[in-house]
Image (spheres, rainbow, N blue to C red):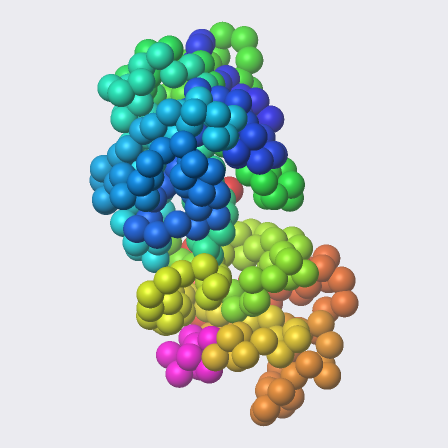
Amino acid sequence: MKIDLAPKIRIVVEQGDALALRVDVLALKYANALYGVDRAVVQALGAVVPDIEKRLPKYSGFYITPARGAIAASHVLFVGVGDLRQLGYGEIRAFGRKVLEALAGEMPSASHVALTIHGPGYGLDEAEAFESELAGLFEAIKSGDFPASLEQVTIVEANRGRAGRLAALLSRLLPDGTGGREVRLLADVADRLRSVGYDSRSKPHVFVATPFAEEMDDIFHYGIQGAVNAAGFLCERADLSTFTGDVIDWVKKRIASASLVIADLSNANPNVYLEVGYAWGCNRPTILVVSDTSHLKFDLQDQRCLVYKKIKDLEVSLRIELENLKALLGFAPTGLS
């Protein structure tokens, strides 16, 4: 998926391995610890950049280094973002802008820059996180804070399903990137995304209690997330295996501030039961779903659950349930794209 932003700048969503992508600069976050792609890149660079981990930046700083053949990119840029659990939508937007601002001064010859998407991997709403990162890029481009030679920005995503969803979202944001409309489109999109990231935390959100397991991905993305976004809510969940530090505190805050909680009780995951109990303690409206009622434990067998066999059935049931709850409880969120 390729969209033109300006006569010499394009944005691309590409499915693939970030370490194998031949670009001038691969830009990554550093969140006071190493995760996912940034961990893999630092491990690869360790053989050619002495004391690489000691060079990584603190919050708001950056560090750029030649890759020296350790990965396909010519250079790697690390941007300090603070602790991961504090990396919200506004910080993701700031990251996108910081990448281009840093390269404008340090590497103006960069013509092709790649980034990964931040947020969905540790529980933030996928579309809101993507739009926040794009908004930061657009903001930098609109203000002229980007490398003088920049021609293309690639957002690379290893997961095929997510890459497809992000490409579709990009097409909706920029439906026509051809001909002579590039500069006007940039202005239009920047105006539309003006507040994305800045006011995202004030938008109503649904917290989804579900295991971060591969077999649950399609259920979350196609059975739950679509219904939640269609109802006008951000859709968030927490991967308890991702964070260091007090993840429980982060989970409690997101549950306590949620408009409602959806919990998938399939396979009787203990973390999900813990999150349901806390939601009830906070008097959060809760929707329980399960693929097989024999999975239900404790007293939940007496609670109303939406039972599903197919992902599409779950989405349809949740759309109806969410609309009923909105009317009953007086929620009036604005529809999300």
On the image, the x and y values in percent for residue 334 come to 44, 50
Q: Quadrant of residue 191?
A: top left
- Name the side, left or right, on which 281 lies relative to 101: right
| In magenta stretch: residue 154 | no
Q: Which segment did they paint magenta?
A: 275-284
- Find out whether residue 280 is within the magenta segment: yes
Instruction: Tell me the quadrant of the picture where the N terminus can be found.
Output: top right
**Does residue 68 sit above or below 331 in this rendering?**
above
Could you say where residue 64 lies in the image, as x and y percent from the top left? 31, 29
Residue beneath the point at 76% across and 67% down: 309
Left or right: residue 217 versus residue 152 is: right
Please determine whether, in this image, residue 16 is positioned above or below residue 150.
Answer: below
Q: Position of residue 116 (x, y in %)?
A: 47, 37
Q: Is residue 2 above or below residue 332?
A: above
Q: Position of residue 78 (x, y in %)?
A: 34, 36
At 50% from the left and 30% from the top, the residue drawn is 71
Residue 237, visible in the rendered structure: yes
Question: What residue lies at 64% left-to-right and 41% top-to-bottom?
Answer: 160
Q: Residue at x 60, y 71 (%)?
A: 264
Can you tell which quarter of the image residue 282 is in? bottom left
